[in-house]
Amino acid sequence: MLYVPISNCLPRLPVDGKGNLFSWPKPWPQRLRSKSPRLSTKLNAEEIYNKDSTHWSALVSDVYLQGLPINWSSVRNVMDMNASYGGFAVALIDQPLWVMNVVPIDAQDTLSIIFDRGLIGIYHDWCESFSIYPRTYDLLHSSFLFRSLIQRCDIIDVAAEMDRILRPGGYVLVQDTVDMINKLRPILQSLHWSINVYQDQFLVAKKGFWRPTDDDTKT
């Protein structure tokens, strides 16, 4: 992205065949839950968008905040590793925290819709390092991300990167298939994380304060 004019990096508002704007996004905070004007140009996108919002509202309120062993009062910095339309972040809007929405480079490009909702976000390839200081985030959230990554890279490398950017005492919350959770679980345990699995689809891992010693690197 070096030396690229910034105007080319900003998402343009959608226009009809005559070049007229469909509409402007609503003011904050109404724009969080209103339809993005960009959806007018995509087939069935509005229906998918509404289902996505309903899904995350119910899942966060009924499961994430009530049924999982996460101390949400200690969580301030959150990253959604596979953000889609940003529904996870919207469902947490009343919590005293902020969410970085990450759109993987091999997923549907929804970053402009995330921006239309008044949220922050970024593109990233999870087979590469994330440009951030170590121990920045309190919670990393992933929903069915790893099934696409295993086609291109080793999830051990992804887990190591997650360990780098998560603070000690922080959480990883993964929703995925039983097979993928069974692959990820021993990797995180090897990093001395505590692991809990719920309903065979939610993995909650808490990072400890352990770090490798010289003796560990020799074994």
Image (tube, rainbow, N blue to C red):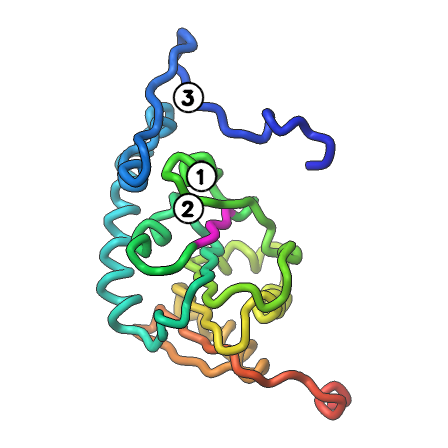
Disc 1 marks which residue? Answer: 110
From mark 1 to mark 2, how far is it between C-alphas?
A: 6 Å
Disc 3 marks which residue? Answer: 14
Closer to the chain start, of discs 2 and 3, is 3
The answer to which quarter of the image holds residue 144 is: bottom left
> Does residue 125 sit above or below 153 in this rendering?
above
Neighbourhood count class around disc 2 (C-alpha, 10 Å): few under 14, some 14–19, many 20 upward: many
The residue lying at 45 percent from left, 72 percent from top is: 171
Q: Quadrant of the N terminus?
A: top right
> Does residue 50 sit above or below 38 in this rendering?
below
Membership of 19 in magenta stretch: no
Q: Which mark is residue 84?
A: 2
Percent x, y of residue 203: 40, 72
Q: Is mark 2 on a helix, strand or loop?
A: loop
Q: Which amino acid does label 1 sit on?
A: Thr
Percent x, y of residue 188: 54, 77
Closer to the chain start, of discs 3 and 1, is 3
- State the residue in front, 183 or 193: 193
Classify residue 140 as left or right of residue 36. right
The answer to which quarter of the image holds residue 153 is: bottom right
Which region shows up in magenta? Answer: 99-103
Q: Which amino acid does label 2 sit on?
A: Ser
From mark 2 to mark 3, how far is it between C-alphas?
A: 19 Å
Closer to the chain start, of discs 1 and 2, is 2
Q: What residue type is labelled 3?
A: Pro
> Does residue 108 sit above or below 61 in this rendering?
above
